[in-house]
Amino acid sequence: MGRWQALLDDRNRFFWVLQAAGWSGYALVHYIGSLMHEMRDIYAIIILLGAYAGFLLTVPLRYLYRQIWDSKPWFLILVVLGSAYASASIWAVIDNATYWEIYKFGFRPESNWFYFKNTTAKFYIMLSWSGLYFGIKYYQMLQDEKQKALMATSMAHQAQLKMLRYQLNPHFLFNTLNAISTLILIKENELANRMMTKLSSFLRFSLDNEPIKKIPLAREIEALMLYLDIEKVRFDERLKVTIEVDESVENALVPSLFLQPLIENSIKYAIAKMEEGGEVIVHAEHEGEDLVVVISDNGPGVKQPADDLVNRGGVGLANTRDRLQALYGKRYSFTLSANEPSGMRVEIRIPFEQVDL
């Protein structure tokens, strides 16, 4: 498959392969047709010489057609008809000369009618060759335009994903740096240093993973734990996190850093508002053809509709939903609902894709 694609990509080589194959096929068909008649063996040489003449005469046509490619249609048609007939006439003369000089040993017809019929037949062959040339050329141009459109769409898609991912960093950095500043002001330098170290590790992970690429869920959990280590410095014992990930989904591919904004949302709107703190649970399992990830908390919850909460609940929820839509199209679900007995619950379903080991 790779060699065939390389052949298609090399337009010049592709032309010569088709040129050689086409005229070889012409010679073969002509030879098979001659077997139906009692022809001498030397007739095979006549056929080869005729095919070779056609091969050589169509090469200039290629360069001529390339020169007039952008001309007006009427001019293009006239040039194709004229050049095809001129090539057919030359071919007929060469073909007749080789036929009568080699095969018939000098015998020549007395009338030019034979030459005219031969030229007409070869004119149709040249027109067919020209039609194939233009057809293949137009097909290649359409493929090029399609490829360019796909590339432009892909680049726009990648830019959108990068924008959505990097949109989270300023929001997260503001909260963390504000907490570090507070710790420094109250002389908690050791805690501030720990937070800064954890922040450095988390940002390094963020920069090392492209927003448009997917990573194994196990690695995503590692990044999540780096983030939680930062938050635990802020909330201490008030923040409890439980990770429930089946071994069967540890190698499942997920968008990089898609859990962090959801956990951040739970901490901001649930844990931070509870004096005694709270718990966030991350659960992941393989269900049918989907990977199901559930993030739930035991916070106070909210009374507004789920759709309004997604649109007004800060950057995290809407951003994650938009990233999933950009990556999976319609092959995902993002559901926000009340958790029992209290709190909020986010359920994400995406196609189960496993990393190759």
Image (cartoon, rainbow, N blue to C red):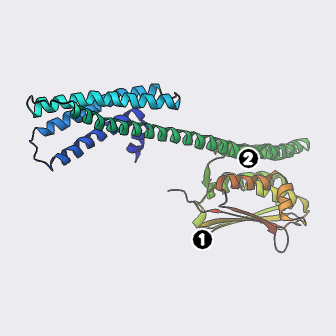
For mark 1, does the 10 Å Cα neighbourhood hold few (<14), some (14 to 19), or many (20 or more) residues? few
Circle 2 residue = 164
Q: Is residue 95 left or right of residue 302?
A: left
Residue 353 visible, this orientation = yes
**314 over 127 or under it: above or below:** below
Q: Nearer the viewer, residue 257 or 182?
A: 257
Which amino acid does the dot numbered 1 rest on? Answer: Gly
Q: Is residue 310 left or right of residue 147?
A: right
Which numbered disc covers residue 215? none
**29 over 100 or under it: above or below:** below
Q: Secondary structure at mark 1?
A: loop
Residue 201, image x and y in percent? 70, 45
Residue 315, image x and y in percent? 81, 51
Q: Secondary structure at mark 2?
A: helix
For mark 2, does the 10 Å Cα neighbourhood hold few (<14), some (14 to 19), or many (20 or more) residues? many
Which amino acid does the dot numbered 2 rest on? Answer: Leu
Q: Which residue is found at the position 59% from the left and 60% from the top?
A: 252
Q: Nearer the viewer, residue 156 or 222?
A: 156
Q: Which residue is found at the position 23% from the left and 41% from the top?
A: 27
Residue 304, image x and y in percent? 90, 64
Q: Quadrant of residue 318?
A: bottom right
**84 over 170 or under it: above or below:** above
- Given the current orientation, which residue lies at the most extreme bottom position? 341
Q: Is residue 253 left or right of residue 101?
A: right
Answer with mark 2 or mark 1, whichever residue precedes in sequence.
2
Circle 1 residue = 288
Residue 235 visible, this orientation = no
